[in-house]
Amino acid sequence: MAEENELRYDPAAIEPKWQQRWAADPKLYAAEPATCGKPKYYVLEMLPYPSGQLHMGHVRNYSIGDALARHMWMRGYNVLHPMGWDAFGLPAENAALKNNTPPREWTLSNIAAMKRQMERLGLGYDWATEVTTCLPEYYRWNQWFFLRMVEKGLAYRKKSKVNWCPECATVLANEQVVDGCCWRHEDTIVEQRDLVQWFFRITAYAQELLDGLDKLEGWPEKVRTMQRNWIGRSEGTEVDFFLAEEIGQGLGTRDQGLEKTRIRVFTTRVDTIFGATSVQLAPQHALVAAFTASDPDLNEKVAELLEQQKKAREAGDLGEIEKHGVPTGHFAINPYNGARVPIWVANYILADYGTGAIMSVPGHDERDFEFATKYGLPIVEVIRPVQKTEGAEHLPFVSEEGVLVNSGEFDGLSCTDAQKLLQEVAARSAFGEATVTYRLKDWGVSRQRYWGTPIPMIHCERDGLVQVPDDQLPVLLPEQIEITQQGGSPLGRVPAFVNVTCPKCGGPAKRETDTMDTFVDSSWYFYRYTDARNANAPFDSETVKYWFPIDQYIGGVEHAILHLIYSRFWTKVMRDLGLVVNDEPARRLFTQGMVIKDGHKMSKSKGNVVSPDDMVARYGADAARTYSLFAAPPDRDLDWKEDGVAGVSRFLARVWRLTTRYAPVARAGRGESHPFRSERGKDGAPADQSTGVSLRLLRKLHQTIAKITLDFEGRWHFNTCVAAIMELVNEIQGADAQLAAGEVAPPVVLELLRTLVLLLAPFAPHLVAELWEELGEGGSVLRAPWPASDPELAREDELEVPVQINGKLVTVVRVAADADAKTLEAAALADEKVQGRIAGKTVMKVIVVPRKLVNLVVK
RNA sequence: GCGGAAGUGGUGAAAUGGCAAACACACUAGCCUUAGGAGCUAGCGCCCAAAAGGCUUGCGGGUUCAAGUCCCGCCUUCCGCACCA
């Protein structure tokens, strides 16, 4: 009776016990100093926002990272495996509004709750390096970097149209606008407002960010492609069309690109410029304002176009917009041939791409063709296809495979040659130049919010913009503050914060009241982990040099653009500041799939959320974690099925029973060596047939070691790793009778069980710790070397080799594993079934692949 | 439209060009029992009453002795970007 009770796997008892022991051992998961002599391995999972609750996506992400970290520890690496909190952000303010809790308090208590969840999952983090971005000891370095970027001209202020979310009452970065709506409020349309904002000059690194992608071979192609698209490099030419009449009034400012006599257009196909039959301006173009100032009728029509564009942008289908345009009544002169073309305003021209103006070439551009057809503008052929292929006779012909016609002195040139020559002419005559345009915009970092890093700048009436001196950092976020949803920065309503003396003149001055985008925090946090308590610098450069780049970064693909492009930018800036020597933050990136339930991503609105706490309470952390690795390969979406968790939990129970049952035998085998390894080394054959069970088990064991080791080295199909361990356990359990009868020698039992436990260590750490102790092993399993597969023991003596006739399976023959081609062929031909099939026919050819197959080609 | 990924049993899935469906879930039958969300045994792609046999990796071609895997052309689904000039 008592025995039956003992044979019960009880994670609810085992897991907290080990968690307490681990918490009491700060060295267990701690990285060692660079001098330790071991190779380093930095494995990092993306830090969570402290919402207060882990979700299954987190569990999956951290289970992958933790398995890898544990494996690398066992491989003898010096592993850095840290965790922290992306702790600034709007939800804390919303919670403050709702519950009247200060954002700091709300955030810190959420962190405490999530940390408890992580510990309850048994995740192996070095909490001594924990980073919390909302604490002054962290965000002071955001401010420090900000000042360095101001000094380098990489942070600057400009008045600009910004994306304003009425719901958040703040500005959003371009990256935070999704289909014209706020990324946090999917139904809230983002407005455009004119504000003076701080920007980081990420465009200064556009080319390097693009080029660097080619070298990031350890990053998923998908992420690299997304970043390439986002950067959106496009080579072309800027050309000035001259205004037919000078515009004398209503001028915009220089920086809006307005001149009295010219319109600058951007084109990727300057070779088609002789076919330009109109110039099209964006409704927001400065010149349009000049035209409309004296033309109320035009003004009204332009307002309409603007409205259409805005609506399309808001609806997220700018691509579907019906093209409309109005002629301004003004004309422009093509600088190459003096052709006089009408200037139009069109709703599909974007003000913020290129120059906000295009030349329209309906003969060689689908979109221009459509527009010209609609409005009856002339269509001219200026490129003729080299070969007359089907469909190439009629316009628009958009290929670059052609030669110029109707293009004056340029006739007969190929498109590419013409582009070069036309660019040279433009440059020589000072009406244009070759340019590269990027879709990437500078990073707007100002936020009119409270819960973020204060921007360390001061506005002085006499001295203008003044940096907060380094020795006055951090600029502390005031604690006592009333949060309201009114517009403007909450910090602006705190006189004690706003009113300061100017560091330069000592006179009265006002602080900047905007805070930084929280993506600033996450752009460099992983550097801080290496030296998290440094009070004099963001980090020690030598320590960073040792640990960087990150060996493996793991997180969701939803961060493919924002976080990962900002992080790359930040690394390059720090490199140029002389703080780091690496060009990229992470050598390898892994994006795990989403956790799905009932066909949808888990979400509150779908009501399909599974709570990690609930899973841990019912099945244990080991089962929840192992299931999240077993149910699908890590890069694919995972369909969460509770039955599956239960199944894994039953498997772990089987491991527990099997190991505890034979642990006494195993312990008795300690110190003795079993005979198989040494004897087989000599003649390659087992000495004694009675040892068949032991050999079979050892063979399976060493095959399993080889498989799992290989997977950790790159393929990462942890689902098949777990499956392989299940097969091994099934094999051992299948020999239960022989084990019970003592037919397997104690040293063999020891090797079997000990290795089984080691193999399971990356996946189910609590169970493993318990069984490790049960087997009489001391110390942490993390300090035990990862098992090595013995190829001699893994080798099969005999194989079943399939025999095909004309590629169809007929039978299998059993042969010695090392049988050569001749032997195999003979065995196949001797087989009865084969004999029957080939009787009366001619064997034309025999393909023999030793160990794999025999294929007879028969006629 | 451009780019990325995927399509295999009732389900999640497995398979360096070499026996398709390992491992598990669910299901079915049986056993055991101190009745548990337990354990053990067996079955489980499709066709045929069964066996023998045949068929089967979204569709159509091709390469090869041999294709889920490689090549070409389609279809479908998911994801990202998109009148970007």
Image (spheres, coloured by chain):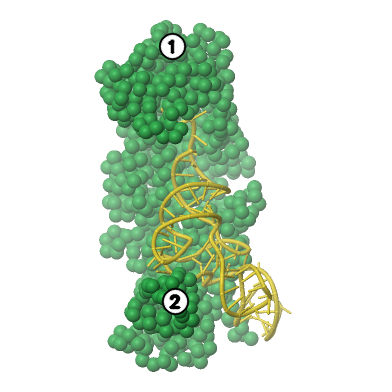
Chain colours: A green, B yellow
Q: Within 10 angstroms of label 1, few (less than 14), some, or many (20 or more) residues?
A: many
Answer left or right for A193 relative to A554.
right
Q: Residue B46, located in which quarter of the rendered image?
A: bottom right
Residue displayed at 51% across by 48% down: A49
Name the one closer to the observer, A512 or A273. A273
Q: Residue A806, located in which quarter of the rendered image?
A: bottom left
Residue displayed at 63% across by 55% down: A598
Q: Amino acid at mark 1?
A: Phe
Name the one closer to the observer, A718 or A221. A221
- Residue at which label 1 appears: A331
Residue A736 pos. (x, y %): 52, 85
> In the drawing, what numbered circle is on residue A425?
none
Q: Amino acid at mark 2?
A: Lys
Residue A30 pos. (x, y %): 38, 61
Real-space Cα distance between discs 1 and 2?
A: 86 Å
Residue displayed at 58% across by 32% down: A315
Circle 2 — which element?
loop
Q: How many marks?
A: 2
Residue A584 pos. (x, y %): 33, 47
Answer left or right for A375 relative to B26.
left
> In the drawing, what numbered circle is on residue A841?
2
Residue displayed at 38% across by 79% down: A825
Q: Chain of mark 1?
A: A
Determine if marks 1 and 2 fall on one subunit: yes
